[in-house]
Amino acid sequence: MKLVFQDWSTPVDFSKKNIQLLNIEDAGYFSEILQELITQQETGSGKFVLSNRDSILDFSKTIEVILSPFILDFSNKKIQNAIIKDFLRIASEEEFLMTREVQGVIQAYLYRLADYLDYDVTVGEMPIIQLLKSAGIQAVKDEDGLLSRLVDYFCLLRKTLNIELFVGVHFKSYFSEGELKLLYKTMTLKGMNLLLLENCSEKEMIEGEQWLTIDKDLCEI
């Protein structure tokens, strides 16, 4: 997989390593690139092109920008919709007979309640999707630590939304070298691609990273 920016001659190539680091030394240019990523994630159009084996990927559906590992929404609308969709598929296929049985039990229960009324009512069959939406189904998040919760979030997005590329902003400021190595190992083992977006000149490359630096003169190193 490759990430290409139209103003750069060097692509970010994930075929060599799953963990890429884009170090933009100029603060103003860093903000410009980050804004471009965020906007293109929302709209799907912009200066970035993400491809896999020469096939162009839909940017808005395959990339997730993590501005802070402290702000991870496990129950955002996209994730919730994907989870309900998976439940609905299972209910309609693998558990079709039990689904019909549950719908019948609910309808019988409602008619039983209706018997207490002093007026007549009719009760329709409850669509299974209404039952699923009212059940409070949510993904479970790990509370053991920041890094563990972040990995859980990555895995959830990969499984529910098929995210191909995760972009972490300033991760080197949040995690120690040992924690980053553990994150890199986990991402590599799970076949997930991570791009670190950094604005640093003092931090050094650690094992597992592949760097592309845009210096203060906007030259590629």
Image (cartoon, helix red, strand yellow):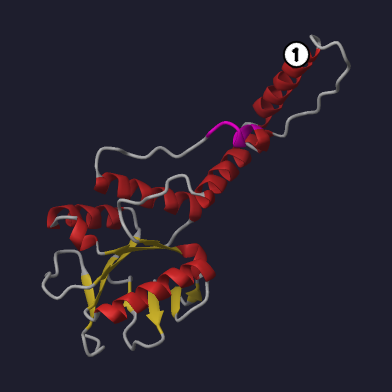
161 left or right, relative to 91: left
Amino acid bearing label 1 = Leu
Quadrant holding the N terminus: bottom left
In which image quadrant can residue 116 be found? top right
- Judge whether 106 appears above or below 193 on screen: above
Point out residue 122 in the picture as x, y percentages from the top left corner: 85, 23
Q: Residue 201's quadrant in the figure?
A: bottom left
Looking at the image, residue 190 lies above or below residue 63: above
Q: Secondary structure at mark 1?
A: helix
Name the residue located 33 percent from the left edge and 75 percent from the top edge.
31
Question: Which quarter shows the C terminus?
Answer: bottom left
Q: Does residue 170 show up magenta in the picture? A: no
Residue drawn at (79%, 16%) of the image: 111
Residue 53 at what x, y percent from top left?
45, 74
Give percent across and percent down for residue 43.
53, 70
Q: Position of residue 170 (x, y in %)?
A: 25, 64
| Other residues around mark 1 within 10 Å, as few (<14) / some (14–19) / many (≥20) | few
Q: Residue at x 32, y 39 (%)?
A: 142
User: Which residues, given as a range, are shown in magenta?
Assistant: 131-136
Left or right of 112, for residue 6:
left
Which of these two is toward me, 50 or 134? Answer: 134
Residue 25 lies left or right of residue 204; in this view the side is right
Residue bearing the label numbered 1: 113
- Nearest the viewer among 68 and 168 is 68
